[in-house]
DNA sequence: TATTGACCTCAACTTTAGTTGAGGTTCTAT
DNA sequence: ATAGAACCTCAACTAAAGTTGAGGTCAATA
């Protein structure tokens, strides 16, 4: 097994494979993150990636941010201030995590509001464009995801999509 | 303006453009939904799409489901039982919305748990693979998104990514 | 030293949810 | 009858977050 005990000094730099198994992300993902500027590497004479151990924490932070729903591009922006293999300090973490927590709270609030609307609309089902709180969400624009921008923001042209299900069938 | 008053019978079938403005989705999206089997259309002699008004409710339901985070493919599956232009009944809506609400609740619960972990970890920042609740989430596999399956589920190989930020710098 | 696992780059492919455009047809009001 | 808006199909493109594969190099161990 060529993998174990490669000049086993206590704290060497890590190879990409070591980082992969230790952080739980694929090697290809590490390449990808590097291409996106989320992590950096030094190179050995033979052009192989070498990482300081601090990269493990950086990856941990990236994965947590991702779990909260932050896109990689945004994570990159926030992390880019913390250049290169600079150790992430407690203050960095505090700053980032507080920010992401606020973000997460917002997302939770939105989903909760939606859930509550859903609850009150289950028994109704009118889905009226004019009257149903499930339609015409106030945050329609802010909730947009990939490529989901309003094309023909028809606004007032939108009519009552359907009368109440229990009422006049459409 | 050729668009207004085209043989303005009270409840004709709708053209794709009419459906677009009335439902607030782009014509191209309607084509796309049709290709994906989410909606159907009849055709005029000249091969143009014609929709029963009930399609408006169907689209409303699709958009609500999307807001809760259900992928289109899943929406399609659930909607496919409700064939063609069959009117969505109150019972259908009740069934679907209850299901989606449960789904939404689950997502909210997950995010809330994450938020709470984040809260308790902001002051700590250890991010220890062994000890930090933010690492090794129990639902790691269930939370997977596009292509995010565990490649080398390294389990016990994963080591302590980093000691506590406040403690020994890595 | 030779083998072999680990590594390298670069390009192409995947999925989701659509959008954009080219080239051509239909509809309907004038 | 005709202009022009609206419609048609099909292919290609976008974005995010990666994965996969081909073809070639490095490095550590037997």
Image (cartoon, coloured by chain):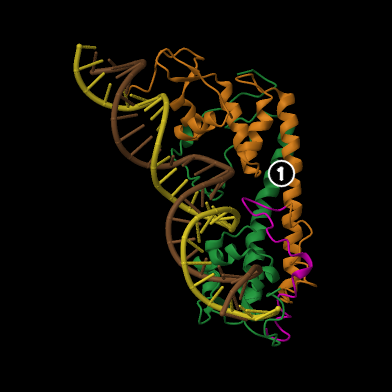
Chain colours: A orange, B green, C yellow, D brown
Q: What residue is rendered at 72% in x and 77% in y? A: B4
Q: Mark 1, residues whose alpha carbon is within 10 Å: few (<14), some, or many (≥20)?
A: many
Q: What residue is rendered at 74% in x and 72% in y? A: A121
Subunit ID for the residue under disc 1: B
Quadrant in the picture for residue C5: top left
Q: What residue is rendered at 70% in x and 49% in y? A: B112
Relative depth, front residue between A44 and A98: A44
Question: Does the magenta run of residues contain A142?
Answer: no
Give the total number of marks visible in the rendering: 1
Relative depth, front residue between B25 and C30: C30
Quadrant in the picture for residue B20: bottom right
Q: Tell me residue B8's x, y (percent).
A: 70, 85
Image quadrant occupied by the C terminus of chain A: bottom right
Does the rendering let one see residue B97? no
- According to the picture, the residue beneath numbered tag 1 turns out to be B115
Drawn side of residue B134 relative to residue A142, left or right: left
**Which residues make up the magenta segment?**
A143-170
Quadrant in the picture for residue B18: bottom right
Relative depth, front residue between B14 and B4: B4
Q: Tell me residue B73's x, y (percent).
A: 52, 62
**Magenta-colored segment: predominant secondary structure:** loop
Does the rendering let one see residue A149? yes
Q: Tell me residue A166's x, y (percent).
A: 71, 84
Q: Tell me residue A1's x, y (percent).
A: 32, 24
Question: Does the magenta run of residues contain A158?
Answer: yes
């Amino acid at each position: 097994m060529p993998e174990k005990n490669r000049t086993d000094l206590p704290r060497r730099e890590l190879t990409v494979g070591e980082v992969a198994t230790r952080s739980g992300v694929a090697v290809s993902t590490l390449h990808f993150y590097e291409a996106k500027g989320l992590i950096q590497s030094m190179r050995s004479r033979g052009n192989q990636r070498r990482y300081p151990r601090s990269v493990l924490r950086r990856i941990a932070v990236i994965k947590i941010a991702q779990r909260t729903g932050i896109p990689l591009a945004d994570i990159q922006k926030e992390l880019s201030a913390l250049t290169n293999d600079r150790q992430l300090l407690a203050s960095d973490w505090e700053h980032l995590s507080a920010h992401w927590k606020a973000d997460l709270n917002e997302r939770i609030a939105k989903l909760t509001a939606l859930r509550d609307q859903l609850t009150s609309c289950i028994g109704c089902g009118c889905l009226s464009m004019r009257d149903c709180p499930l339609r015409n969400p106030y945050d329609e624009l802010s909730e947009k995801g990939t490529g989901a921008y309003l094309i023909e923001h028809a606004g007032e042209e939108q009519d009552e999509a359907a009368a109440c299900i229990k009422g006049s069938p459409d």
